[in-house]
Image (tube, rainbow, N blue to C red):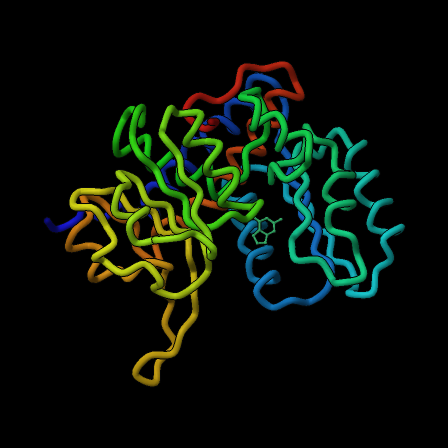
Amino acid sequence: MVAQVIDGKAFAAKVRAQVADQVAKLKEENGITPGLAVVLVGEDPASQVYVRSKGKQTVEVGMNSYEHKLDADTSEEDLLALIDKLNNDPAVHGILVQLPLPKHLNEDLVINSIDPAKDVDGFHISNVGLLGTGQKSMVPCTPLGCLMMLRDYHGSLSGMDAVVIGRSNIVGKPMAQLLLGDSCTVTIAHSRTKDLPDVVRRADIVVAAVGRPEMVPGDWIKEGATVIDVGINRIERDGKNKLVGDVDYASAAERAGAITPVPGGVGPMTIACLLANTLTACCRANGLPEPEGLTA
Ligand code: GUN
């Protein structure tokens, strides 16, 4: 079997176009412009790239972007004061604090100081609890993007066997909750899982989110399974820098029914879903109906 390639780049462009349409409507009919505040502490190069990209795409869909760049030695008190200000600013509908934070800042404390209604990352304990109990919440962007692609490809996911490899708070755990919410039978596998190849071989859906280059070989993949590769790993091969996923793409594509490439798969969906979440937060804040197809 040669897998169908799930084009995340094209899908993300479609999501952004939907968001832009809804933003234009909100402005015209309600005089409201959604606003996203992004807070970056320090100068981590990868974080700087992400934050720039987020700001650019926010403006492109017609939203207001507020960037707050703070020094690496910013005190917790000053960061919490900024978050409090953003929580109380009616022009700000979404707040994202870029992770990782410098070591002297308590990440949990900072994230949990964001108003849950503005927590467009879905990392606040209230949102984690709401998602876990099947209530309306803000859903973490990367898993939301994976879910959108799976629903688009399969229609219903009901009854499918899904394996999520990786148990991070940002991807693995919320991904498992979302798949459970769509009535999959879900296994969360991780570095201590016994017989990982056997566990993966049973799965109709494999979501790989471990951050280890090409750790899932094609012969672990069940014939016809759908493979969602969340990994973005920079490696050197043949003297060149290359981005690869957590799945060995070439061998997996020979067995899978559908697969996301790296780059161009899950990656572009993350920021598209951040914009979708900001729109959702803005609609909820104003008592307006939520955009269709852009939430879990
Ligand atoms: N750092 C890496 N991924 C993310 C993300 O999804 N959200 C935030 N806030 N920081 C990140």
* Tally of numbered tags: 0
Q: Quadrant of residue 80?
A: top right
Q: Residue furthest bottom?
A: 239
Residue depicted at 71% across the width and 58% down the height: 101
Q: Is residue 8 left or right of residue 292?
A: left
Residue 261 image point, x, y percent: 30, 55
Q: Quadrant of residue 112?
A: top right
Residue 36 image point, x, y percent: 64, 40
50 up-or-down from 93: above or below: below
Q: Nearer the viewer, residue 182 or 72?
A: 182
Residue depicted at 43% across the width and 63% down the height: 212
Q: Residue furthest front?
A: 194
Residue depicted at 21% across the width and 57% down the height: 219
Q: Nearer the viewer, residue 264 or 206?
A: 206
Residue 31 image point, x, y percent: 63, 22
40 up-or-down from 25: above or below: below
Residue 256 image point, x, y percent: 20, 48
Q: Residue furthest left?
A: 1
Q: Quadrant of residue 238?
A: bottom left
261 up-or-down from 182: above or below: below
Residue depicted at 60% across the width and 60% down the height: 47
